[in-house]
Amino acid sequence: METILGIRGEDFAIVAAETTQARSIVVMKEDENKIHKISNSLVFATMGESGDTVQFTEFISKNIALYKMRNNYELSPQEAAHFTRKNLADYLRSRTPYQVNMMIAGYDEQTQKAALYFLDYLANSVEVKYSGQGYGAMFCQSIFDREYKKGLSKEEAYTILEHCVKEIQKRLVINQKNFKVAIVSKDGFNWMPDISAKNICN
């Protein structure tokens, strides 16, 4: 019962994640941050079993930081996505698989381009211009298809995400009140204003 979304432009990538933490029919909390800053140019939006998402994200984050200390340079978004996928695939074949789905967004300082990756719990990984995971994402693909254009600005990408959240509020039976939003670009990692049902549905 979770939703994460992602969209990228030429030199930026934005991810959004709803903040509800629920199990079965019970809502535990409504301020869970599912967006994890891995480095100043890399961010993960995660969903799945709450313990798995935290543990696996921390494991990947610390190993990426260790790689930078040992080699004096950071992994590119593509390299980070491949590293994450490889670890998820290895654990999938063990007795302790991680039930984690994620969107990986990053900015490559060498190529000066952004990247966005879709990665699911079966370790399927693909680079995308836009995508989402979870129940809410089912209502967003047509919006992405219709409104995405080459060379879109950060403001236009944020507006598309607002339209997605508005459609989720309108169509999805599950209440997802608030989405946290983060961006990575040449200026590094930054938070953007939350997208809340209260603001966009009035």
Image (spheres, rainbow, N blue to C red):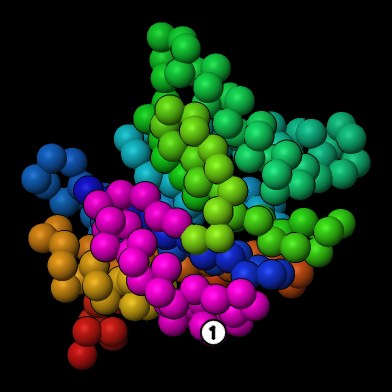
In this rendering, does residue 104 appear at all?
no
Q: Residue furthest top?
A: 95
Please provide the residue range marked out in magenta: 131-160
The overriding secondary structure of the stretch rendered in magenta is helix
Please tell me how crowded label 1 is: few (under 14), some (14-19), or many (20+) other residues with Cα within 10 Å: few
Relative depth, front residue between 37 and 13: 13
Residue 67 at what x, y percent from top left? 79, 34
Q: Residue at x 11, y 47 (%)?
A: 26
Q: Residue at x 53, y 22 (%)?
A: 89
Residue 85 drawn in magenta = no
Quarter of the rendering occupied by the C terminus? bottom left
The answer to whether 16 is drawn above or below residue 123 in the figure is below
Residue 142 at what x, y percent from top left? 34, 66
- Could you say whether the residue bearing mark 1 is in a helix, strand or loop? helix
Q: Is 90 left or right of 198, judged from the image as shown?
A: right
- What residue type is disc 1 on? Glu
Q: Is 103 left or right of 40, judged from the image as shown?
A: left
The answer to whether 142 is drawn above or below residue 44 in the figure is below
Residue 69 at what x, y percent from top left? 84, 37
Q: Residue furthest right?
A: 72
Q: Is 74 left or right of 142, judged from the image as shown?
A: right
Residue 138 drawn in magenta = yes
Using the rendered view, name the quadrant where residue 197 is placed.
bottom left
Q: Residue at x 61, y 74 (%)?
A: 150
Kindly identify which residue carries mark 1.
Answer: 155
Residue 42 at what x, y percent from top left? 66, 53
In this rendering, does residue 142 appear at all?
yes
Relative depth, front residue between 130 and 175: 130
Using the rendered view, name the quadrant where residue 195 is placed.
bottom left
